[in-house]
Image (spheres, grey):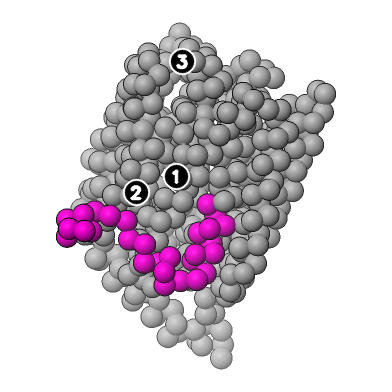
Amino acid sequence: MSTKRRRLSLDLSPLRTSRDFRLVFTGGVVTAFGSFISYVTIPYQVAELTKNPLMVGLIGVCELLPLLIMSFVGGALADYIDRRLLVRGSEFALALICGILLVNSLSDEPHLWLLYVAAFLTAAVAGLQRPALDAMLPRLVKPEELPAVMSLHSLGMQFAQLFGMPLAGILLASFDLAWVYAFDLLTFAVSLICLTLVKAVPPPVAADRPSLNSVVTGLKYAKSRPELLGTYLVDINAMFFGMPSALYPFLAQGLGGPKVLGLLYAAPAVGSLIATVGSGWTARVHRHGLMVLIAAAFWGVGIIGVGLSGTLWLTLFCLAFAGAADMVSGLFRMIIWNQTIPDHLRGRLAGIEMLSYTTGPLLGQLRAGAMARTGLGVNGSIWMGGVLCVAGTVALAAALPKFVKYNGRDGMALKKAADEEWVATADARTGR
């Protein structure tokens, strides 16, 4: 392999050097594969029961409310207890919710309200789990392997999305809903086995007890770091205006029906996968903030294309283009987070991060559904959202000059100094 190709290719070394990362990676890919199938199925089921795009968009509202609270709770807990136990317990709870959806689908008249309750509970449990998972990953590998870990983690999720969502479309067109939820339930068994085999990930030295004050400490730290604020605001803007996934069931009606629905959900993953496989170059780029802004603007351009396209192949291409841009943005945001945030704050900041990359899409679904009910229609809601995404990104670049100039080398030095200071002063804080 040439030097140029090695520089572009994905770094697989964390899978070779860390047993626990291999287990977390494997379990995560398997459970994500099933979860992406349900991710397609729940909006599809709501659309079938209501025939109303706004009712599909309301799923995002049900998911947003618990996330606003539980992400802070999960972040505080992740900085105080064994992060592996928190991830595993949450995974078991998610499996139970999937079982509820399975039972509901077997009913002659499935309850619509139960779908919204399941969305609410899933978001609440995810709010507990995701900060612990994000905070656990840096503890499983060497610091210099973090860019590769972020790429591999993203690759696993894109693989699951790429194959899980098209399979959902096939299953929905060929089998009863119960089989779809049953498949998802089976994947949870695999992930729970993998998480059980992972070694304990104890909390940092002199960990802060979960409390309102500890949450405020995390918020103050995030506010003091312009590179962190930039990652949050840019992603919220991009996803709020440029996330039209609530409209996919209705967009599919004009492009081929239910059999292409999974393709619409999976197309962004194709672009994300291509961007991830060729992500070796990201380790040599240090202007992380600038790259996040550029990628976010290209995401908006792709969404504009989706709204203006009237053919299936062009729509899929534009979604793939947008997915590649979003993946580049995501990789650099994750690198900023994991290379700059001290370990004793990692869980709480992961909770804030979760709010940034979930509130935008969830509110964006509501925005897309509401605008689609105006004179713009489904396609107009999509392309107008893309335009607003690009405009918002340009405005944020002007408003956040420190984020534009941010250099990753400076962030790594700050994290190292903060970690060393925390350990050195542990006895004084605990009164020993």
Say which mark, if any, is on residue 245.
Answer: none
Is 10 within the magenta? yes
Task: Tell me if mark 2 has few (under 14), some (14-19) or many (20+) residues whose alpha carbon lies within 10 angstroms of its own.
Answer: many
Q: What residue type is labelled 1?
A: Gln
* Closer to the camera in the image, 155 or 400: 155
Say which mark, if any, is on residue 255.
Answer: 3
Q: What element carries label 1?
A: helix
In the displayed structure, would residue 134 be above or below residue 57? Answer: below
- In which quadrant will I find the C terminus? bottom right
Say which mark, if any, is on residue 158.
Answer: 1
In the displayed structure, would residue 233 be above or below residue 370? Answer: below
Q: Give the range drawn in magenta.
A: 1-29
Image point (69%, 38%), residue name: 181
Q: What residue type is labelled 3?
A: Leu
Image point (69%, 46%), residue name: 185
Please indicate, yes or no, whether residue 117 appears anywhere in the rendered image: no
* Closer to the camera in the image, 279 or 225: 279
Please indicate, yes or no, whether residue 179 appears anywhere in the rendered image: yes
Image point (79%, 31%), residue name: 106
Rendering coords of residue 297 (x, y %)? 28, 35
Rendering coords of residue 209 (x, y %)? 61, 71
Lateral position of residue 382 relative to residue 432, left or right: left
Q: Rounded to the nearest whole Å, what is the CA distance between mark 2 and mark 3?
A: 28 Å
The residue wearing badge 2 is 276
In the displayed structure, would residue 181 be above or below residue 137? Answer: above
